[in-house]
Image (cartoon, rainbow, N blue to C red):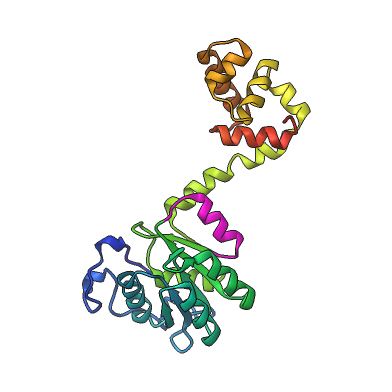
Amino acid sequence: MSVPVYRLSEVKADPGSREFGIPLTTPAGSPAWPGFLAGQAERPVRVLLVDDDPHIRQVIAQELLTDRRTDLVAQGGSVRDGTRLAATHDFDVLLVDLNLRDGSGFDLIETVKLTRPSVEVVVISVMEDEEHAVHAFELGATGYLVKNSWFGNFAQAVLQVANGGASITPSLARRLLHRLRPLSPMLAWSGAGLKQKLSRREREVLKMLASGYTSTEIGQQLCISPQTVNAHIKNIYRKLHVHSRAEASSVAAQSGIL
């Protein structure tokens, strides 16, 4: 089933326009949507939407209301709105922005997951960094969509999480994979393993690197040039299969050499 893709920044304000980039009719109830999946026309996935931008809410609402597989039961623009609506409506999926006018979407996620642990949560945010995404996942979210990025559409995201999947903006998902890649070698390192892998000087540089020293400061402490320090750092990265000081520091911490 082909799903249109668009940027929120390209969406027009008229909710009745085809320029929303979404179909005005959907194949809900057709053989393209198997009967065993959540989101049937007679029993759509119920959604609570909380975003403080009225235009964005209008865009998302139009998508959800156009697709017969999803049902927008309520919408609000603040943590207070979301808390009240979550207590008075039955819903399956929470779509929530992180920057709300009276607080953080994280607070609303925590509240909802405490009172309705089975509810799926999809974050919609302008914040694209991995730290916010990881924190949202730690709180129980199963989706993270970055505004003005290519990700399919909101109805599709709702249906994905309602059927046991996850919905993450592809560019962010790729960065998260790169972030996780060093974990396996990290966990494999022990103090003895590092001694075998790294030279004595490289271990000294790694310890100082993990302690927050700059290349110049390390060179001054070890009486070597900053260029030599950088050469050691490059060798450390290559040997430990890491790509940054933070990852190298994590290896040092995991190995117990700090």
Q: Residue furthest right?
A: 192
The segment highlighted magenta reads: 127-142
Split into 4 quadrants, where in the image is the N terminus?
Answer: bottom left
Q: Residue at x 51, y 55 (%)?
A: 132
Q: Left or right: where does residue 237 sit relative to residue 16?
A: right
- Between residue 244 and residue 36, name the one nearer to us: 244
Question: Does the segment drawn in magenta span residue 154?
Answer: no
Residue 61, given in percent of the width and then of the height, sits at 35, 77
Residue 211, given in percent of the width and then of the height, sits at 63, 30
Q: Residue at x 23, y 79 (%)?
A: 16
Q: Left or right: where does residue 132 sit relative to residue 25?
A: right
Instruction: Give above or below for 103 relative to 69.
Output: above
Q: Determine the image quadrant of residue 165.
A: bottom right
Q: Determine the image quadrant of residue 231.
A: top right
Q: Residue at x 62, y 15 (%)?
A: 221
Q: Residue furthest front?
A: 102
Instruction: Give above or below for 31 relative to 232.
Output: below
